[in-house]
């Protein structure tokens, strides 16, 4: 089995915007001695990650230009619809590269003061959510053997394999930034976080990840579903209300962005709706609860441009830069048109 040869081939095809279908990608993999469908999926995703990371760390590009390039990469990738018994069991749905870039860029700290920030991804998969973060300052954790092996082939600061529901005590308030997209499901037994009873796996994993964040750190969390509200405008009673009340009570929640799964997740092999939660540190004095329904938090994002506008990573841009931004957007459209000219066959 020639894993490196296969990944190199897929990276080349991605760079030239050559599209593939599930059939052609599996045919190419077979030529490199890879017949296991789970390995085809994981190695294909690793190729996408390596190309996305290369773009994310291109110093000649602005943050917005990097984002546009990664959006173009996403549109050129094969639809990762190859679902295996393992991915179904573990509820493994990787975050699309454009969303991953925005999430990891959000927590990226400017280290111009000379210190060395530390970042954590406690359910890292193949490393997709870390693409904007520097390898040597990023700690990743994963239980799946194939994905753990893929992580170890990348120069992360540390690669580990512990239960994300039980982070090491040494990780308590250690990291400047935390990013995570935990698998979803129900807990066999509820977990207590103070007086808050948490029943969902993804909620418990997210809260344990936040325990690893410094009080002045930042976090980007992706969880499934959209928030719903009752007739009084409160978050609907149940697991979501408890989870969100905890977040708003202890942390400075900057935004919760509802993402249209059909529009922005489809190439990852799922159409599940998600929420991107942006947190800018812990509250000095815990207080409050989830706010009542408002227009911002109930407005679903259905395009990459809308998502950029919502996260808005470059506030220094002024109105005078609009012409340049429009030119960049036209360039992105041109790239997408070029991609459509390729056949799906090899």
Image: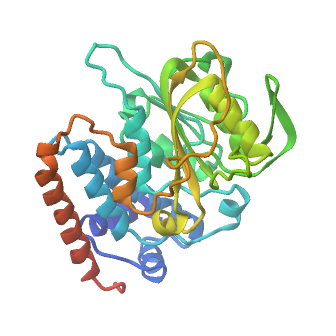
The residue drawn where x is 17% and y is 65% is 330
- Check the image and name the residue furthest to the front: 232
> What is the image's colouring?
rainbow
Q: Position of residue 111 (x, y in %)?
A: 30, 20
Q: Nearer the viewer, residue 54 or 277?
A: 277
The residue drawn where x is 28% and y is 48% is 54
Compared to residue 108, the image places residue 33 above or below, namely: below
Q: Position of residue 191 (x, y in %)?
A: 82, 33
Image quadrant assignment for residue 248 = top right
Q: Is residue 2 left or right of residue 260?
A: left
Say whether residue 49 is visible.
Answer: no
Compared to residue 248, the image places residue 57 above or below, namely: below
The residue drawn where x is 80% and y is 46% is 238
Compared to residue 35, the image places residue 183 above or below, namely: above
Q: Is residue 83 left or right of residue 254?
A: right
The residue drawn where x is 62% and y is 18% is 172
Q: Nearer the viewer, residue 158 or 295?
A: 295
Compared to residue 66, the image places residue 292 above or below, namely: above
Q: Position of residue 225 (x, y in %)?
A: 64, 55
Q: Is residue 234 left or right of residue 119?
A: right
Image quadrant assignment for residue 142 = top right
Q: Nearer the viewer, residue 99 or 188?
A: 99
Q: Nearer the viewer, residue 62 or 92?
A: 62
- How many numbered tags mark residues here? 0
Q: Is residue 336 left or right of residue 149?
A: left
* Quadrant position of the C terminus in the picture: bottom left
Q: Position of residue 3 (x, y in %)?
A: 44, 60
């Amino acid at each position: 089995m020639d894993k490196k040869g296969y990944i190199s081939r897929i990276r080349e095809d991605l760079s030239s915007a050559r599209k593939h279908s599930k059939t052609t990608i599996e045919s190419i993999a077979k030529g490199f001695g890879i017949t296991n469908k789970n390995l085809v999926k994981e190695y294909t995703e690793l190729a996408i990650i390596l190309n996305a990371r290369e773009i994310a760390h291109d110093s000649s590009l602005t943050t917005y230009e990097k984002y546009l390039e990664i959006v173009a990469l996403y549109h050129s990738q094969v639809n990762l619809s190859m679902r295996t018994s393992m991915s179904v069991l573990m509820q493994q749905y990787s975050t699309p590269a454009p969303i991953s870039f925005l999430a990891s860029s959000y927590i990226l700290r400017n280290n111009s003061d000379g210190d060395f920030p530390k970042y954590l991804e406690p359910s890292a998969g193949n490393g997709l959510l870390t693409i904007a973060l520097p390898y040597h300052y990023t700690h990743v954790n994963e239980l799946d053997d194939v994905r753990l092996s893929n992580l170890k082939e990348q120069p992360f600061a540390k690669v580990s394999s512990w239960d994300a529901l039980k982070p090491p005590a040494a990780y308590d308030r250690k990291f400047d930034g935390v990013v995570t997209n935990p698998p979803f499901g129900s807990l066999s037994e509820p977990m207590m976080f103070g007086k808050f009873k948490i029943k969902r796996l993804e909620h418990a994993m997210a809260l344990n990840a936040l325990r690893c964040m410094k009080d002045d750190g930042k976090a980007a969390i992706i969880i499934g579903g959209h928030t719903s509200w009752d007739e009084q405008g409160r978050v609907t009673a149940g697991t979501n209300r408890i989870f969100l009340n905890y977040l708003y009570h202890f942390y400075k929640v900057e935004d919760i962005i509802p993402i249209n799964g059909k529009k922005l997740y489809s190439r990852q092999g799922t159409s599940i709706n998600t929420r991107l939660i942006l947190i800018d540190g812990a509250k000095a004095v815990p207080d409050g609860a989830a706010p009542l329904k408002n227009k911002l938090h109930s407005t679903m994002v259905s395009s990459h441009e809308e998502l950029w506008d919502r996260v808005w990573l470059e506030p220094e841009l002024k109105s005078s830069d609009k012409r340049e931004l429009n030119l960049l957007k036209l360039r992105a459209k041109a790239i997408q048109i070029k991609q459509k000219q390729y056949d799906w066959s090899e």
